[in-house]
């Protein structure tokens, strides 16, 4: 009893603050700073994710504003990455150009982040974590929960702090038949829920969609139907970090005994990293170099191509512009888009589809066949299941636009949450939790103060 009183006294003035440098109000540019304040002083902080976003016209990549961190460098104990997608990892070069800090994540996550980081001539310490390991970073105790998404080795993060436990549910869905067979660790989530979660930060981008998100497995059949119909070469495109989808494409190419050609630097790098670590499996001698493609007649080749978002200079855009010296698209070739346009990229994806159509190719995309892509994000039932398992006192929807946040709020209220238990910070805001149970939304905490001239 006496010990408990002391503990209460010890932590009475403690605060846990989450500063949102990205990943709120938008689906991408994920970056969250967890800060532990003791007796009014910042003591430790941990950053979760450090990803890029996309400009509204889809033309450029944007990085989070890290100015807020510059005078707090000595308190940052590490960056913890949730999974290997670009919008969670690809702004590391920008952060590390300003701040020296170690990076932690699961095996594939770290390997992909490291491969992308390699082109920048910056020092960095990457640490691969086992899913069951516990990482002590100052006052934070970090553990990982394996979740299903559209990339293997994706995780949610449990952040234990002296103020309470936070469950950071970045991108996830409950896929009971994932491509790699490794399901979400539901028992682990339920167990932390039982111990008590102060706040759940949850992916909310599919909160408008009813039911559960379909399993990745469902795509295999639709893909098979399209490839069976193909009269020429098949060009398959998806986001190049979508390793699970690439595996399905490889499986189908092998089923039809087509040789595989990987086109585009990001596609080749990601595939190489994932294959080396055993997350992507190619049958022996199934992959050939693009130079060798000429030797094969149509109907024997399956190209896996980067550039599903119509990015300028991507491998698929170059093919559409007839700007690849080894390979050209011919009438009756089939082009399969196994990705939906990221918001902002619609126009350039449509332009790309038009160009490919003019070349005579048969282009299949989500507007004419919506069974060639499933989201890696949970829909309403997945989101409610996560709330039910974690039983948080408070909820912050993340990784979604304001409309997704709003719909997530509706779902949470259906689950019995009151409006004041659901917080909706915007970029550069913070939410502060005190050990005595107060919760406050702080506006514009990370806005740069104007420099005063004397
Ligand atoms: Zn993701």
Image (tube, helix red, strand yellow):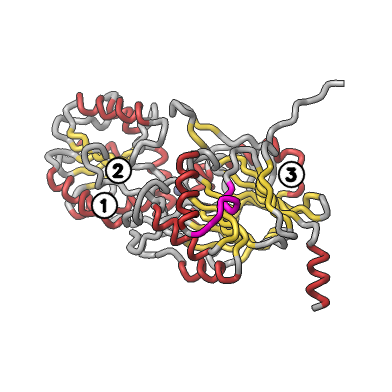
Q: Position of residue 116 (x, y in %)?
A: 51, 42
From this view, report whether residue 388 is shown above or below residue 255: below
Taking the spot 33% from the left edge, 50% from the top edge, the residue there is 245
Camera sees residue 117: no
Secondary structure mainly formed by the magenta segment? loop
Mark 1–mark 2 CB contact (< 8 Å):
yes
Residue 250 placement, left or right of 432: left
Dot 3, how many residues are within 10 Å of its Cα: few (below 14), some (14-19), or many (20+)? some
| Disc marking residue 73 | 3
Residue 219 - label: 1
- Residue at image location 57% in from the left, 35% down from the top: 63
Residue 307's quadrant in the figure? top left
Pointer 2 residue: 338
Tell me, yes or no, whether the highlighted magenta stretch contains residue 367: no
Q: In this view, does 313 lie above or below 249?
A: above
C-alpha span from label 3 to label 1? 45 Å
How far is the residue under mark 2 from the one under mark 3?
A: 41 Å
The secondary structure type at the circle numbered 1 is helix
Q: What's the magenta region?
A: 416-423
How far from the left and from the top, in percent, is residue 54?
Answer: 48, 33
Provide the secondary structure element on which disc 3 rests: helix
Quadrant in the picture for the N terminus: bottom right
């Amino acid at each position: 009893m006496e010990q408990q009183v002391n503990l209460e006294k010890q932590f009475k003035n403690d605060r846990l603050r989450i500063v949102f440098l990205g990943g709120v109000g938008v689906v991408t540019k994920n970056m969250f700073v967890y800060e532990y304040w003791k007796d009014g002083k910042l003591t430790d902080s941990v950053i979760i994710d450090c990803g890029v976003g996309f400009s509204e016209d889809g033309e450029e990549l944007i990085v989070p504003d890290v100015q807020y961190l510059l005078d707090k460098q000595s308190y940052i104990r590490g960056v913890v990455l949730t999974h290997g997608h670009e919008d969670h990892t690809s702004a590391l070069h920008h952060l590390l150009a300003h701040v020296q800090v170690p990076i932690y994540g699961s095996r594939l996550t770290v390997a992909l982040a490291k491969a992308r980081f390699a082109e920048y001539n910056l020092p960095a310490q990457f640490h691969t974590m086992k899913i069951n390991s516990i990482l002590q970073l100052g006052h934070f105790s970090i553990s990982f929960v394996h979740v299903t998404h559209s990339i293997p080795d994706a995780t949610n993060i449990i952040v234990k702090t002296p103020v309470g436990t936070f469950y950071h549910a970045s991108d996830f869905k409950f896929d009971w038949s994932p491509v790699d067979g490794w399901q979400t660790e539901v028992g682990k989530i339920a167990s932390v829920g039982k111990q008590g979660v102060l706040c759940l930060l949850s992916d909310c981008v599919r909160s408008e969609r009813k039911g559960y998100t379909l399993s990745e497995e469902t795509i295999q059949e639709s893909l098979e139907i399209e490839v069976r119909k193909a009269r020429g070469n098949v060009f398959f495109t998806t986001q190049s970090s979508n390793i699970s989808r690439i595996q399905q494409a490889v499986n189908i190419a092998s089923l039809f005994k087509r040789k595989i050609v990987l086109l585009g630097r990001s596609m080749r790098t990601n595939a190489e990293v994932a294959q080396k670590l055993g997350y992507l499996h190619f049958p022996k001698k199934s992959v050939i170099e693009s130079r060798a493609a000429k030797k094969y007649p149509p109907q024997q080749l399956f190209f896996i191509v980067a550039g599903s978002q119509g990015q300028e200079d991507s491998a698929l855009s170059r093919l559409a512009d007839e700007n690849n010296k080894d390979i050209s698209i011919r009438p009756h070739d089939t082009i399969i888009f196994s990705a939906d346009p990221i918001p902002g990229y619609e126009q350039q994806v449509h332009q790309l589809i038009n160009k490919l159509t003019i070349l005579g190719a048969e282009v299949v995309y989500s507007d004419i066949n919506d069974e060639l892509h499933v989201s890696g994000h949970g829909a309403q039932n997945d989101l409610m299941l996560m709330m039910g398992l974690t039983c948080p006192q408070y909820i912050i929807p993340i990784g979604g636009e304001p409309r997704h946040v709003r719909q997530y709020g509706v779902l949470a209220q259906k689950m019995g949450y009151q409006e004041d238990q659901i917080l909706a910070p915007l970029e550069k805001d913070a939410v502060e939790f005190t050990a005595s149970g107060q919760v406050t939304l702080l506006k514009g905490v990370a806005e740069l103060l104007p420099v005063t001239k004397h």
